[in-house]
Amino acid sequence: MSAISVPAPAGAPAPGKPQKAGMSKGKKIGLSVFAVWLLGIVFFVAVFGFKSHKAPDVLSGVFTPTNEFKLDTWFSLGPVDFNKGVLYVLLAAVITLWVMIAAVKRLRERPGRLQVAVEMFYNLTFGMTKENLDDRLGRKYFPLIATLFVFILVTNLIGYIPLPVNSVDKFTIFGAHLPSFQIYAADTNVAFPLMLALLVFCLFTWEGLKAHHGPIGFLKSLMPGGVKGAMVPMIFGIEVLSYFLRLISLTVRLWANLLAGHMLIAFMGGELGVLVGDQWVQWLLLPIGIAIFLFEAVLIAALQAFIFSILTAIYLGSAVQSH
């Protein structure tokens, strides 16, 4: 029986010839974005040249990179000055309560995606609590550690959402002066992480005083075993100093990381170009600003919340132990 040859469809490669792989959709998008970025640089250089064109606000010193972190009082309620820092803290508190209440209400026997995420978060926070605290302290402080994690995470994340909170640089629509959009995080004001750190510091100090039966026993517990002679005063001073440095460590770690991240986003996202007065510099550095923004929002926001929470568990656990 002879084989019947079937003609190849029109446009199909001939038998025996390797088929050329076409460019993927992702590569096409990437090359298109790169082409737009490159053409943008050429355009700004062609139109404005390399000569500096500083804005009047930059020359007069009205515009400075620190304006983002300046807290202007909008109005006062008794002793409380209401500004964007207070607004962000209130937003974070409301969103944290809503997330935790909504998660509990939607728990089911057959979990969906939300419940899987909630259970992963529960296992993470419960694990860090169990590894560092005994059963009694774990049951007592697990809600606090979990809440701190969510609260700081929410605070960090909403800090990357542009909101109309810039009351310094307003824009006008139909005669109305409206605040400009701006990204801001409550963590970039040192008072916010300091208050959280003071809460944690007071709690593990209180637990240490109770566990070691008063101030004398608590101070003795700071001293490592086996130290004798002339080394005792020096080691004791170092241990006391390191104990109080925990307060600074908790505060500065959260504050400095978020502050540095927001400053880098602002500088690479356009502020550096504004300061030097070159439009092509703004366009040139824009991809770096976007990359830093994504890095901060995806990784640093969650990482700093995790670090603060696990250090809280570690400090609480070490306070009831003797060296």
Image (cartoon, helix red, strand yellow):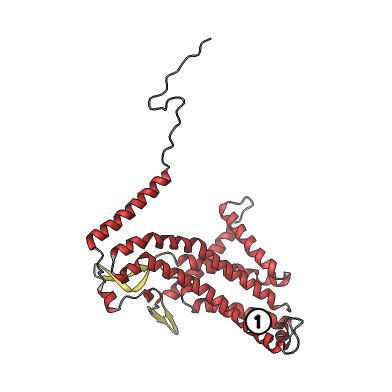
- The image quarter containing residue 243 is bottom right
Number of numbered discs present? 1
Residue pointed to by mark 1: 205
Q: Residue at x 38, y 68 (%)?
A: 267
Amino acid, disc 1: Thr
Name the image quarter holding the C terminus.
bottom right
- The image quarter containing residue 277 is bottom left
- In depth, the one of 151 and 254 nearer the eye is 254
Q: Is residue 239 visible?
A: yes
Q: Residue at x 30, y 62 (%)?
A: 280
Assess disc 1: are there few (<14), some (14-19) or many (≥20) residues with their C-alpha within 10 Å of its C-alpha: some
Q: Position of residue 320 (x, y in %)?
A: 71, 78
Q: Residue at x 65, y 66 (%)?
A: 128
Q: Secondary structure at mark 1?
A: helix
As drawn, the residue found furthest toward the left would be 47
- In depth, the one of 200 and 10 nearer the eye is 10
Q: Position of residue 232 (x, y in %)?
A: 72, 87
- In depth, the one of 101 and 249 nearer the eye is 249
Q: Is residue 245 above or below residue 259?
A: below
Q: Position of residue 9 (x, y in %)?
A: 41, 24
Q: Is residue 11 above or below residue 277?
A: above
Q: Residue at x 41, y 77 (%)?
A: 83
Q: Is residue 178 visible?
A: no
- In depth, the one of 179 and 55 nearer the eye is 55
Q: Position of residue 215 (x, y in %)?
A: 70, 88
